[in-house]
Amino acid sequence: MAKFTKKKSGELPAVSTASLPDIVFMLLFFFMTVTVMKDNSLMVDNVLPIADQVQKLDKKDRVVYIYAGKPHPRYQSKYGTEARIQLNDKFANVDEVAPYILAEKAKMRQELQPLMTTALKVDKETNMGLISDIKQELRKVNALKVNYTTKEGDALRNME
């Protein structure tokens, strides 16, 4: 006849932590692959105008951004309150736009260079004269595909 014995100690076995380093490294690699680094820090005020007929750009690798607007309050003591142009992470004059566009175009792959689009992210309080000057510089370097970045909404709200 078989003899059954009951376990006398009711303690649970310790939880195995052997897989914990694998989980930590898996999370680390996940965040390293998913995280996108910020391209530019904005140095100008950039409240975009509102438009009702908006089209989204699909391929961001073909877009070169030019920012325009009043300098952010932390830069106003050095650069004043007049609207300025920001190219990458520095303020620029109008005559620096053409060399910047040519340099950005040279960085692109050969097959993408004819498809380059220049996106103007302009504050809604910026004078049109500055925008016209930027467009003249773009025309000099044959960068004729220009996009105005806006927010989607009722265009009549721009009058407020």
Image (cartoon, helix red, strand yellow):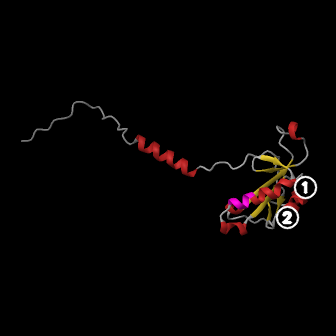
- Residue type pointed to by label 1: Leu
Q: Which span of residues is magenta-colored?
A: 103-107
Relative placement, left or right, of 63 versus 70 is left
Name the residue located 33 percent from the left edge and 34 percent from the top edge.
14
User: Mark 2 to mark 1: distance in Å?
Assistant: 16 Å
Dot 2 surroundings within 10 Å: few (below 14), some, or many (20 or more)? Answer: few
Q: Position of residue 43 (x, y in %)?
A: 79, 44
Q: Position of residue 98 (x, y in %)?
A: 82, 58
Q: Is residue 96 visible?
A: yes
Name the residue located 81 percent from the left edge and 64 percent from the top edge.
141
Query: Which of the pair 139/84 is nearer the observer?
Result: 139
Dot 1 surroundings within 10 Å: few (below 14), some, or many (20 or more)? Answer: some
Name the residue located 68 percent from the left edge and 67 percent from the top edge.
112
**Residue 148 lies within the magenta run:** no
Q: Secondary structure at mark 1?
A: helix
The residue positioned farthest toward the left in the image shown: 1
Q: Position of residue 33 (x, y in %)?
A: 55, 51
Query: Which of the pair 7/154 is nearer the observer?
Result: 154
Relative placement, left or right, of 48 versus 113 is right
Quarter of the figure with the N terminus: top left
For disc 1, the marked residue is 130
For disc 2, the marked residue is 140
Relative placement, left or right, of 48 versus 4 is right
Name the residue located 85 percent from the left edge and 65 percent from the top edge.
139
Q: Is residue 149 visible?
A: no
Q: Secondary structure at mark 2?
A: helix
